[in-house]
């Protein structure tokens, strides 16, 4: 039997779980891929900017389904040294790889693997080591291997500084040390696939490897036969003392607020960092005093507003101008991930933002700590599970469009590309979604009071 066609991504998947490779080959239709369009586009942008670290001039291998064409084109470009080749493509004994950036010097080659992450994960060593294995197997002299990744401490100024945006870690010595391991793993993978043909599906128990280092696309397939009742259900718990302590800490007016944000690896806005949570929307329900009618306010940035973060911050600090409890679900997100960054960006609003943070009360805590738990929450403290558990008629499934945070981010980022009518419909869906988040907080508050009156 011939050696399996093993790409660098397939190799890394096999290290996580060899059954992934088998399923991808024989049952690819069972995969459920969850990668978003914006995630894919962000990865492309990172790759393009990383190439420019090495200069604007480079020879690019265009992707096509016929890998032989890419391999032959790479051979042509290798003759042009010195030059930079992107997506340089190689095949050694049916082991295949595309190198993100190949620095082709007179005295040898340098491999650069580009990642959108802010640190070097151990799986990246395996990825780069496989590339070294392929190139050195072809008799090529690889003198250096590096990982190019995002520097999350970089703060964008008016112009993007690529040397500051990216870190490059030299991992050459580690890669060389791993070559015996690579050879053995390639052989093991080939033996595994010889032992498991199309009619002999491997049996591998589920475990931590199902989600580390990457979430497996075949999770639902591999868990389809598990009995839903195989784990004992926790009994309902309502710790009235904990709930009473939380409710007693509240001061009017009560502000029930939720933010929507997006983030990108390449900071596009002056004063922001890579992967900074950029707030574009909030919903706010207000109870000014005991027995007062429920009020609602909201903010959703315009798609063409280049200063939307400032406008978000001004609007938020304006509507939260009075002392009172600011009620959120997951305080660390609004307080640390968003507000503290806003205070750094806009020093003139710092005092107002710090006051808001000091008044924050986290409604997630009783559910997270299982001080309030019902079996309908199905072991989760997500507000998406908690709300329908407490109020079966209130569910995010009833929303017409956006139903969760990632979808909200995608919807906002795509507003610019929509015709006016579609844009207005998307804005309506965003407002409905965020409004339900804060209405959920109001209903949780009502449930807390109801429990204490029983």
Image (spheres, rainbow, N blue to C red):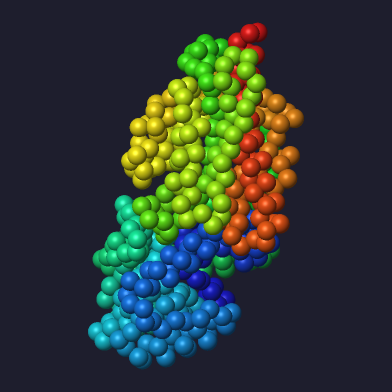
**In this orientation, which residue lies closer to the viewer: 136 or 152?**
152
Left or right: residue 278 compared with residue 303: left
**In this orientation, which residue lies closer to the viewer: 347 or 249?**
347
User: Which residue corresponds to the image point at 29% horizontal and 65% vertical from the top-left?
Assistant: 163
- Image spot of residue 224 (x, y percent): 68, 47
Left or right: residue 294 compared with residue 170: right
- Image spot of residue 15 (x, y percent): 46, 59
Please state the total of marks drawn on the protein image.
0
User: Which residue corresponds to the image point at 65% horizontal and 21% vertical from the top-left?
Assistant: 293
Q: Is residue 131 visible?
A: no
- Image spot of residue 304 (x, y percent): 54, 57
User: Which residue corresponds to the image point at 52% horizontal and 64% vertical from the top-left?
Assistant: 41
Q: Is residue 80 visible?
A: yes
The quadrant of the picture occupied by the C terminus is top right
Q: Residue furthest top?
A: 454
| 13 versus 2 height, above or below | above
- Image spot of residue 136 (x, y percent): 35, 78
**In this orientation, which residue lies closer to the viewer: 338 or 186?**
338
The quadrant of the picture occupied by the N terminus is bottom right
**Image quadrant in which you'd find residue 297:** top right
| 214 versus 140 height, above or below | above
User: Which residue corresponds to the image point at 53% horizontal and 12% vertical from the top-left?
Assistant: 244
**Image quadrant in which you'd find residue 154:** bottom left
Left or right: residue 212 compared with residue 29: left
């Amino acid at each position: 039997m011939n050696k399996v066609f093993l790409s660098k991504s397939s190799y890394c998947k096999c290290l996580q779980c060899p059954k992934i490779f088998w399923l991808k080959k024989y049952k690819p239709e069972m995969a459920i891929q969850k990668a978003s369009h914006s995630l894919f586009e962000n990865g492309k942008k990172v790759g393009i900017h990383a190439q420019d670290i090495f200069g604007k001039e480079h020879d690019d291998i265009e992707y096509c389904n016929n890998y032989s064409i890419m391999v032959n084109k790479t051979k042509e470009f290798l003759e042009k040294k010195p030059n930079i080749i992107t997506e340089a493509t190689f095949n050694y004994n049916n082991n295949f790889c595309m190198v993100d950036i190949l620095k082709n010097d007179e005295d040898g080659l340098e491999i650069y693997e580009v990642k959108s992450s802010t640190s070097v994960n151990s799986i990246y060593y395996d990825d780069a080591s496989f590339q070294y294995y392929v190139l050195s197997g072809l008799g090529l002299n690889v003198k250096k291997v590096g990982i190019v990744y995002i520097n999350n401490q970089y703060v964008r100024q008016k112009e993007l500084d690529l040397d500051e945006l990216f870190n490059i870690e030299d991992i050459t010595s580690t890669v060389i040390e791993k070559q015996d391991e690579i050879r053995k793993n390639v052989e093991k993978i080939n033996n595994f696939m010889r032992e498991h043909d199309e009619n002999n599906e491997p049996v591998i128990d589920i475990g931590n490897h199902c989600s580390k280092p990457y979430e497996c696309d075949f999770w639902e397939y591999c868990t389809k036969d598990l009995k839903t009742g195989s784990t004992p259900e926790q009994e309902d718990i309502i710790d009235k003392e904990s709930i009473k302590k939380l409710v007693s800490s509240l001061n009017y007016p009560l502000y029930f607020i939720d933010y929507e944000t997006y983030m990108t690896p390449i900071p596009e806005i002056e004063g922001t960092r890579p992967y900074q949570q950029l707030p574009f929307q909030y919903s706010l329900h207000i109870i000014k005093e005991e027995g007062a009618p429920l009020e609602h306010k909201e903010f959703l940035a315009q798609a063409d507003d280049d200063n939307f973060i400032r406008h978000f911050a001004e609007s938020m600090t304006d509507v939260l101008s009075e002392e009172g409890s600011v009620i959120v679900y997951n305080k660390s997100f609004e307080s640390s991930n968003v507000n503290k960054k806003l205070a750094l960006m806009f020093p003139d609003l710092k005092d107002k933002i710090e006051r808001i943070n000091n008044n924050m009360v986290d409604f997630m805590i009783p559910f997270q700590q299982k001080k309030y738990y019902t079996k309908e929450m199905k072991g989760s403290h997500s507000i998406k599970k908690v709300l329908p558990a407490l109020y079966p008629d209130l569910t995010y499934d009833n929303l017409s469009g956006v139903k969760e945070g990632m979808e909200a981010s995608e919807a906002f980022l795509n507003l610019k590309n929509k015709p006016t009518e579609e844009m207005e419909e998307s804005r309506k869906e965003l407002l409905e979604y965020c409004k339900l988040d804060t209405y959920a907080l109001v209903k949780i508050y009502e449930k807390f009071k109801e429990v204490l009156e029983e």
